[in-house]
Image (spheres, grey):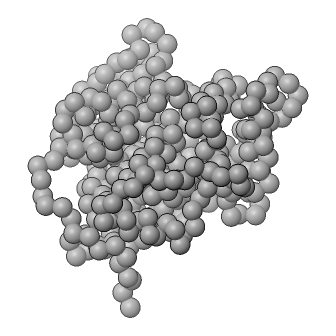
Amino acid sequence: MSPRHYFPRSPPPTMSTKIGYGIVTCDREDFFRQGDKDRITDHVDHFVVVNDGREEYAASSYGRAPVVITHHGTPYQGVGASKNEALQRLLNDGCDYLFLQEDDVIVDPVVLEEYIKAFEVSGIHHFNFPLHGVANKTPAGVPIVKAIVPYMHSGQPLNLTFSTWCVGAFSFYTRHALETVGLMDEQFYNAVEHCEHTYRICRAGLHPPYHWFADVQGSERYIEEIEFSNESSVIRRDAEAFDKVVLDGMKAFKAKYGFETSAIPSVPQTSFLPVLRRIAEGIHLPSDDIPEESAPFLPSTPAAKPMLEEALGAAVRLTEGMSSDTPQGRKDMAALREASEYFGTIL
């Protein structure tokens, strides 16, 4: 028996649309050089690279891509601001579909069409590749998904996957999504920026509820993660400084919304599927997923629960003002670091 395709939806009429592609990079030319940038240029209408680093890359690294150098001898402007620089330039160029990539993944541009098809059949305006770092996969690298939902595009199956953790190394946006919710909040300097931005898109009804992060099934065949280490990351190589950046991001989110992202409830599948149908029908109702006074979302893996519970308690104490320079504060920061390494993000 063929699988039931839950949300049949005819693609919209073919229109003259522009595709934009942006890459943000910072002092990692060895990472950035991997992958053929000119292949991307051949698949999109507008392409921009934002280099927020202090190191000058060789001109050959960029291929034919236009480049924006942001540092000019000043401190880094940060990931959020760099992503905004790329997105704003692509919007100014009139792009309707926008792709945004960090420098530690290699993307085969044939996958771009699959994301556009996914939007056309699902009505979902934002996708995030979920398999970056240790998030959403087993230690052996096998993807962990909460749901696989079948759609049809031009008579061919196109499946979407939905994962637990929000990852921002490769993302797709429609122009409508960005014009509806705005760009990234630059107070999130080098952490949490993509989580907060995706949360706004979820709240606008343009993406399923938080903790049900959408992607195209099989995207890992086209998007390759460059092997990650803390030493290779400009942001993470100073563990103490990175801890402070993450903590500042957590505090900023709580100051903005009154709760941590870990407190956002994960709706059950019985509620998730009707939301997908509503989105597919073009009904984008604002979400009401503000957390109630109840237990925060926890993963279903029993062994992971104690670790995350301890990290959540640590996050509450630190965001409420406990100094990270006290014995308890240092213990809490260690708990957050352990959870972050295990889950990819506790946010």
Residue 192 vs 146, above or below: the answer is: above
Percent of width and height locating residue 175: 27, 43
* Left or right of 189 in this view: 20: left
Q: Tell me the residue at 17%/43% (across/down).
A: 18
Quadrant of res 49: top left
Q: Tell me the residue at 26%/60% (across/down).
A: 120
* Left or right of 267 in this view: 302: right
Q: Tell me the residue at 37%/35% (across/down).
A: 182
* Residue furthest top as drawn: 73
Percent of width and height locating residue 66: 24, 27
User: Quadrant location of the N terminus?
Assistant: bottom left
Q: Is residue 37 visible?
A: yes
Question: In the rendered picture of this protein, how many numbered marks are placed on residues?
Answer: 0
Quadrant of res 331: top right
Percent of width and height locating residue 295: 72, 55
User: Quadrant location of the C terminus?
Assistant: top right
Residue 60 vs 340, above or below: the answer is: above
Q: Is residue 39 visible?
A: no
Quadrant of res 152: bottom left
Name the residue nearer the viewer: 338 or 18: 18
Q: Tell me the residue at 25%/40% (across/down).
A: 20
Residue 57 vs 93, above or below: the answer is: above
Percent of width and height locating residue 290: 57, 49
* Residue furthest bottom as drawn: 1
